[in-house]
Amino acid sequence: MNGDPRMAGLAPELAATVHAGARALRDGDPRRAEALLQQACRQAPEHPEPLRYLAILQLHTRRAPQAIDTLQRALHITPDDALLHADLGTARSACGQSDAALDSWRRACELDPRQPTPWFNLGRNLQQRGDTEAAIEALERACTLAPELLPATVLLGDALAHAGRFDEAAARYRAALRLHPACGDAWRGLSNIKTVALDDADAATLRAQLQRRDVADPDRVAMGHALGKLEEDRGRHAEAFAAFAAANALQQRLTPWSAQAFERFVEQALAASETLPAPLDPELGREVVFIVGLPRSGSTLFEQILAAHPEVEGASELPDLGIVLQQESQRHGVPYPQWVPQASAEDWHRLGRDYLERTERWRTTRPRFTDKQPDNWKHAGILRAMLPGATVIETRRDPLETAWSCFKQQFYSQPHFANDPGNIAAYLRGCERAMDRWRARDPARIHLHRYEDLLADPEPRIRALLADCGLDFDPICLRFHEARRSVRTASAAQVRQPLRGDTARARAYGAALDPLRAALNLPPG
């Protein structure tokens, strides 16, 4: 205890109090931990370490603003302490202060470049912001300093895949699996590199790992999806179906999704958005092209085409619209969309400006950008008041192919509709019904584009897509697969290839998908 260099200058009994507080927090007794750490802070107000531990406690108990204040008090004492800057970055990130958090982690890396954790946190958050090349650089530093740091190895694989460097990504995922053969995130990453099939040795490893009883459920789910994809690639559709079904059944038990709650939400959103005030500025949001609809409906492909245009930046799946509306819900004290009927034109203008300020970095080199968050369809009805100048592109694909592709894909956010065929059908119907209504209310701004139409006759459909977005035709959009950009979705490999007409997969499963067909009101296979 006395050998801890960070405790230097503390009386031994105070160092013991700080360590006792840390043990209490670790043992699940935050009240006792806080009493001990507050006592140490009072008795040693000019020492940063009790304050740092107190901030860790405040973060653990979801009091990030207080943690920021506490860490800034500690930094006033020792302004060049790398660990304090690193912890401040974590606290700022928890408060949604992403730019300030990056500044803190960068400062920590400058002060002590030998520590892997600040490099990892910097890389992880740069990757979330879409700054993939800088993320790769930071994550490579973390992996060099700590080759055994599994999350950094996996995330570096993700960043390399998003940058189109698939061989290097696969090597990182393989490195992660050497550290932890049941690492679900690594198996998911390898499986999502759809241009390189997993092999017989992978199949044997996956089956062996799935037989273990000590595998965590999230890893088991991810490995089940990877095994299903492997078996599908080998043409063993019965085995693939069994693997996908088992993985989804487990996920549904872990995180059940309620179709009834979803259907209530759709009804509320339709009713709340029926009458909205006229916008103060009808052109507000003209910079934005929202691409919405179901996952796996071709939205990444449509974004890749638009992002090839010299006036458009492809920003991928942004959280900002949801965050702006969530913050407004917190301000009102009621969930979205219950407060929508009370919002004034001034409120909607303010919210639109908030969104545009949050996304300003996507317009630094090109005047317009895409926001391809599929879930944004839930908010399409209020955009004519909040961002009336924005374009909304809804993508649709054959319903059975969309549903089956969703069932096969493991999604990060849970609970999720894609774990159950009946839930998939309910979600698809609710999305299409709402979008049909909203498009009828705002036909000049909300446009429907179908994946199969694009495959069948690319150039006319690409011309129509650009026209709907108010963009002049540019032939470079026909060569969208050559665009060099970060693609942060499961389709990162596919959209870097020319269009293919053989993407349908459901037919090969025959009668096994009849329950899904029945839920979608389609005839048996």
Image (spheres, rainbow, N blue to C red):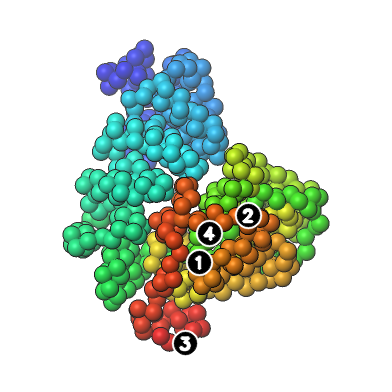
Quarter holding the C terminus is bottom left
Labelled pair 1, 3 in contact (Cβ < 8 Å): no
- Residue at the extreme top: 9
Label 1 amino acid? Answer: Ser
Decide: few, some or many residues near mark 3? Use Cα within 10 Å; few <14, some 14-19, many ≥20. Answer: few
For marks 2 and 1 on the same chain, the one whose residue lies earlier in the sequence: 2
The quadrant in which residue 505 appears is bottom left
For marks 2 and 3 on the same chain, the one whose residue lies earlier in the sequence: 2
In this view, the mark in front (4 or 1):
4
The quadrant in which residue 362 appears is top right
In this view, the mark in front (1 or 3):
1
- Residue at the extreme front: 475
| Circle on res. 478 | 4
Q: CA distance from mark 4 to mark 1?
A: 20 Å
Q: CA distance from mark 4 to mark 2?
A: 19 Å
Labelled pair 4, 1 in contact (Cβ < 8 Å): no
